[in-house]
Image (cartoon, coloured by chain):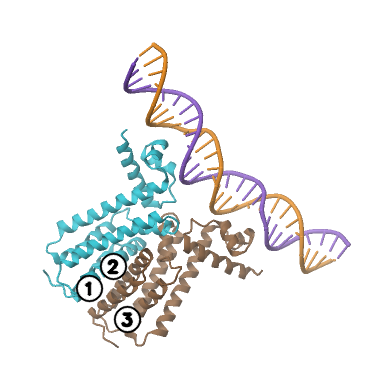
Chain colours: A brown, B cyan, C orange, D purple
Amino acid sequence: MDQEEARTRILDAAERLFYGRGVQAVGMDELRTAAGVSLKRLYQCFPAKGDLVEAYLRRRDTRWRAALAEYVEGRAGGPGERPLAVFDWLHDWFAEPDFRGCAFLNSFGELGATSDGVGRVAREHKRALLAYLTGLVRALPVDGPDAVAGQLALLVDGAITTAALTGDPAAARHARTAAGSLLAAAGAREA
Amino acid sequence: MDQEEARTRILDAAERLFYGRGVQAVGMDELRTAAGVSLKRLYQCFPAKGDLVEAYLRRRDTRWRAALAEYVEGRAGGPGERPLAVFDWLHDWFAEPDFRGCAFLNSFGELGATSDGVGRVAREHKRALLAYLTGLVRALPVDGPDAVAGQLALLVDGAITTAALTGDPAAARHARTAAGSLLAAAGAREA
DNA sequence: TAGTGTAGAGAACGATCGTTCTCGCGCAAG
DNA sequence: CTTGCGCGAGAACGATCGTTCTCTACACTA
């Protein structure tokens, strides 16, 4: 087996287990079994569990944001619908059977006080998300686009945590409605 | 030492340590030392760690919501300012030096997949918060007060998680601005 | 005063954690 | 063919976890 394939299989197993049950609830031995990789290989790919956690979060960050951007790009008609399409994508995500909230907020809540690496990755993720939303809002004729983007980011995080706790994807629709009101209040016209 | 006092000291230590560093990062022995209580006493008050975690969360829930309600009651002028006062209270909370996000969301992210007791308490907390916000909004002449309250709840959760991650209490002000826009959009007048 | 029960201090236990070490097998080079 | 070398399988290690047990000291009662 290639070193590259081993990394992929380890990261796949890590994402499924860490995201589904929490980092501390999954031992390295169970992870090794799920990945179908020897313990030696696992430790030569990731010298410590913390490295694996950070790598898992980084890969998930890029994939998550790419999937969101691809959906918004392909779905939304005009620029005015793009910020709202974000919440449509959230709704689809929330409805997935293994949805369990934001991986970064969960990991930060679990390890943020101990590991600064987790906190760093989580902050970068949210900062990148805010930057993406800011780009979407700036393309519209709204007053104070950066402030509005920050408000949308609050709605996104609120919807994710609410959906995770209640198990109800409807939080995405409520957030979408609120986002529409905020954009309208800031003067967005259907462009 | 009284049994009642022992319970209080244990819960005080549990709240400080569990909230500050996460549940799994704190052992029963460290907790025993922090509480100044014998191990035997600790286990006769709380037969297992899970019981202590749930008790800590339940006490925090009642105190947290009581503090919020007291602030809103005493601070806000008219009923129209009450929903906004919620975010002022959040700002004060975020600025506290040991603020580390929502104890219920943190615990749920850490243990929600394993322990259903934690999930139950966290859901009850958020449901009670939503009910409180609904009461505040229903006192105003707005269209669809329940939907608006749900939107405010999204902003509250978003502000808490954002402030926890960035360490910046400004998230509360942004959320307050957004809440004002949403209330205005729903037809709230300064009552 | 002698006996009894309870509490505190901390050792001890079994389980599990992250990590490393050992062993044996297959393969490639000389 | 032989001789290393790298890999997989899993035992082993030290630490730590949640929980229980032991032992001692002391307050209260007859």
Question: Marks 1 and 2, how far apart in space?
Answer: 10 Å
- Circle 3 — which element? helix
The residue that disc 3 covers is: A138
The residue that disc 2 covers is: B155
Quarter of the picture holding the N terminus of chain A: bottom right
Quarter of the picture holding the C terminus of chain A: bottom left
Q: Are marks 1 and 2 in contact (CB under 8 Å)?
A: yes
The residue that disc 1 covers is: B182
Question: Marks 2 and 3, how far apart in space?
Answer: 21 Å
- The answer to whether residue B101 is visible is no
Marked residue chain, label 1? B
Mark before the other along the chain sequence, 1 or 2: 2
- Circle 1 — which element? helix
Q: Position of residue A55 (x, y in %)?
A: 51, 65
Q: Amino acid at mark 1?
A: Leu
- The answer to whether residue A142 is visible is yes
Marked residue chain, label 2? B
Nearer to us of marks 2 and 3 is 2
Q: Amino acid at mark 2?
A: Leu
Q: Amino acid at mark 3?
A: Arg
Same chain? Circles 2 and 3: no
Q: Nearer the viewer, residue A40 or B96?
A: A40
Label 3 packing within 10 angstroms: few (<14), some (14-19), many (20+):
some
The residue under the point 30% across, 68% down is: B154
Label 2 packing within 10 angstroms: few (<14), some (14-19), many (20+):
many
Q: Quadrant of residue B2?
A: top left
Q: Quadrant of residue A129?
A: bottom left
Q: Which mark is residue B94?
A: none
Q: Position of residue B39 (x, y in %)?
A: 42, 37
Q: Nearer the viewer, residue B123 or B105?
A: B123
Q: Is residue A188 above or below residue B188?
A: below
